[in-house]
Amino acid sequence: MSVASELIRGNTETIILAQLMKGDGYGYMVNKAILNLTGGRFELKEATLYTAFRRLEDAGCIVSYWGDETTGARRRYYSITDLGKESYRLRKKEWETAEAVIDKLLAEGEKGGSK
Amino acid sequence: MSVASELIRGNTETIILAQLMKGDGYGYMVNKAILNLTGGRFELKEATLYTAFRRLEDAGCIVSYWGDETTGARRRYYSITDLGKESYRLRKKEWETAEAVIDKLLAEGEKGGSK
DNA sequence: AGAGATACCTTGACAGGCGAGGTATATATT
DNA sequence: AATATATACCTCGCCTGTCAAGGTATCTCT
């Protein structure tokens, strides 16, 4: 089953930060990594991806620099800042809280309701 | 920790359907039930709640009727339809898929990244 | 009379996601 | 030489769900 993007909303920035926690990366690469990790079930749309990078940079969570490719298309690399790492950990905790709450609320539908 | 509503987005209708799976209910009651179940960590805003009811009714997932209260404020009761029950089960599966995908993607940040 | 709880509703603004379009380079195919 | 595909970036404008702010009305308690 593919993933409804409505349900991902609010997590895109955290997902990007998680990728950058492993080391610097550029947009196209980050998106392909996500695609591979999810077995093709989920992919950020380019417009979503690049606007998220912009927001993260404006917020000081990441910094960017151009790669020195001598061949092929230019690449803008992103590096996570200390603030970004802190933000990642906080957002992840928030996600875990939300996840538990939603799980509980959705499980309510399995109760009673025979009639 | 309270729950960031951005992360709930896309789940409000499913949460409402889960409540109605247990039996008919009205808006105010459904919202208080959610508040209690989450120990006060989460509450739908009224505007969100009522627009969600509207969408669910337009989609044929619920039907509504006025209660016959002879005292106190009037209540609009909602009843889940067969389509709504089916929708609940589908949305719950979609949530579980999204949940697993997000968990996996966010866990990536815990890898490597010593430097 | 006033406060607070119950109970419903609408309007307008806001933010994130994304379809559709654009630019540019390199390689492989016809 | 022309075309297609992959890589790689970017922006504009629409859509949708959330929600602050405002409104209405009833009942109970002080």
Image: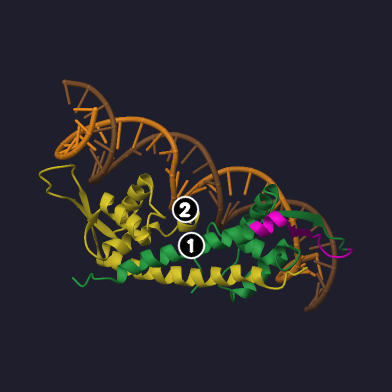
Chain colours: A yellow, B green, C orange, D brown
- Is label 2 in contact with label 1 (beta carbons under 8 Å)? no
Residue ranking furthest to the right: B70
Q: Is residue B49 visible?
A: no
Q: Residues within 10 Å of mark 1 (few under 14, many from 20)?
A: some
Report the residue at 75% width, 59% height from top.
B79
Numbered marks: total: 2
Check the picture and name the quadrant holding the C terminus of chain B. bottom left
The chain that hosts pointer 1 is B
Q: Is residue C30 left or right of residue B71?
A: left
Report the residue at 49% width, 65% height from top.
B4
Which stretch did the figure color magenta? B70-86
Q: Relative to residue B32, is residue D12 depicted above or below?
A: above
Residue B97 - label: 1
Residue A1 percent location from the top left of the image: 48, 56
> Which element carries disc 2, helix, strand or loop?
helix
Residue B108 percent location from the top left of the image: 32, 67
- The residue beneath circle 2 is A5
Q: Nearer the viewer, residue B82 or A64?
A: B82
Q: Relative to residue B44, is residue C16 depicted above or below?
A: above
Report the residue at 32% width, 50% height from top.
A54
Q: Is B83 inside the magenta-drawn segment?
A: yes
The chain that hosts pointer 2 is A
Q: Is B95 inside the magenta-drawn segment?
A: no
Q: Quadrant of residue A72?
A: top left
| Residue type, numbered disc 2 | Ser
